[in-house]
Amino acid sequence: MKHILAAATLVAATLLSMATARAADFGVTPMMDGDSFIGCLAQNNRTGIGYLAVGDKLALFANADAFAITKGERVKGTWSVDGAAAAEFSSTADSDKTVTIDVPNDAPTVTALTSGKELTVTANGIDVILSLTGTEQAFTELMTCMKENGGE
């Protein structure tokens, strides 16, 4: 968990400064802490969706102007794909207007995210619907990034 929190903070500071691959409007890049590999980030600035893989952990980032969230603020809410049952989350905002959600890195969750059309996030009472377009290709590139950098 320590690495994913450090990586999330790093993501908030760098959001796609050096993308190494493109996957359907997602930039995919390895995340480094000096010379140490942390994980890989897939970020789509157009839709506001991002994924961070660190070891066997997976985090989802949802960024939207509608989120009246400031860095350091406690965030509680739910997320769901295509109207399925919502899962609860609780986190601390790493940056303004961004929700970070630790999601299960398991087959049902990845399948839902990669085959789904819309992600609904409710954060501190504010509902936002984000497009999941390109997520399947982004996950493929995210896995490639992890394998190429020794993270999987």
Image (cartoon, grey):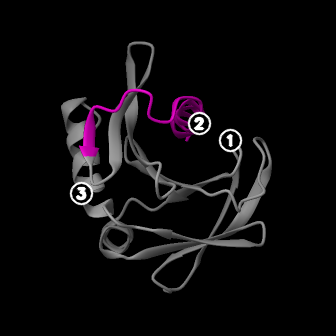
Q: Secondary structure at mark 3?
A: helix
Crowdedness of circle 3 by 10 Å Cα count: few (<14), some, many (20+)? some
Residue 128 in which image quadrant: bottom right
Q: Which residues are magenta?
A: 1-22
- Residue 21 visible from this viewpoint: yes
Mark 1 = which residue? 95
Give the amino acid type for the residue marked by disc 2 in the picture.
Ala
Mark 2 = which residue? 12
Crowdedness of circle 2 by 10 Å Cα count: few (<14), some, many (20+)? some
- In front: 133, or 92? 133
Give the amino acid type for the residue marked by disc 1 in the picture.
Ser
Mark 3 = which residue? 137
Residue 98 pos. (x, y %) = 64, 51
Q: CA distance from mark 1 to mark 2?
A: 6 Å
- What mark, if any, has residue 124 been given in the picture? none
Q: Is residue 86 left or right of residue 127?
A: left
Crowdedness of circle 1 by 10 Å Cα count: few (<14), some, many (20+)? some
Figure check: 24 above or below 79: above
Residue at 53% from the left image edge and 35% from the top image edge: 11
Of the 4 image quadrants, the one containing the C terminus is top left
Pointer 3 with pointer 2, Cβ within 8 A = no
Residue 46 pos. (x, y %) = 46, 54
Pointer 1 with pointer 2, Cβ within 8 A = yes
